[in-house]
Image (spheres, rainbow, N blue to C red):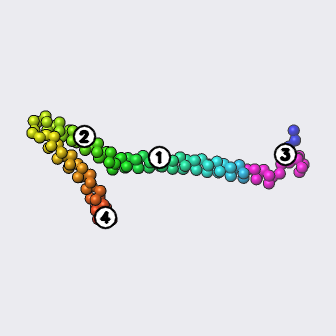
Amino acid sequence: MRSPSSFSDSQSPDRSETESNRGSDSSSGLSVFGSIMLMEIQEQLNQINERNKRVELDKAWEVSFTRRLFISIVTYIVASVWLWSINESNFLLKAIVPTAGYILSTLSIPQLKKLWLKNKI
């Protein structure tokens, strides 16, 4: 076996080539690290976008006509049953009062919110 000093110039590895290979190894290491970071950031962005979609759907449900109608019907039924159970006369007519109160509150809340936000800013 020959010692490294016994190599001729033609047989010894080129120093600049070895150094450039090391440089590309470290830069590829950085690009791999950068790719991993970009993938993590992309995954986080995807999770945020999915969460935003869920929040938007929840918000749409909160102000939907379907939700208000359902709550109004349930309110009327519960009030009717309660008034009937305590033997109140005209219980079906009187059950309209809490239902109307709920409907009026849902109609007035958006205007109150706008007023509150205007005064808050």
Mark 4: which amino acid? Lys
Mark 3: which amino acid? Pro
Alpha-carbon span between mark 4 and mark 2: 34 Å
Query: Label 2: which residue?
Result: 74
Quarter-of-image position of residue 3: top right
- Tell me the tag on residue 118: 4
Q: Residue at x 28, y 45 (%)?
A: 69
- Tell me the tag on residue 50: 1
Q: Nearer the viewer, mark 4 or mark 2?
A: 2
Quick check: marks 3 and 4 in contact, CB under 8 Å? no
Disc 3 crowd, CA 10 A, few/some/many (<14, 14-19, 20+): few
Whether residue 32 is in magenta: the answer is no
Residue 78 drawn at (x, y percent): 20, 38
- Tell me the tag on residue 4: 3
Q: Nearer the viewer, residue 92 or 4?
A: 92
Residues in magenta, as a range = 6-22
Disc 1 crowd, CA 10 A, few/some/many (<14, 14-19, 20+): few
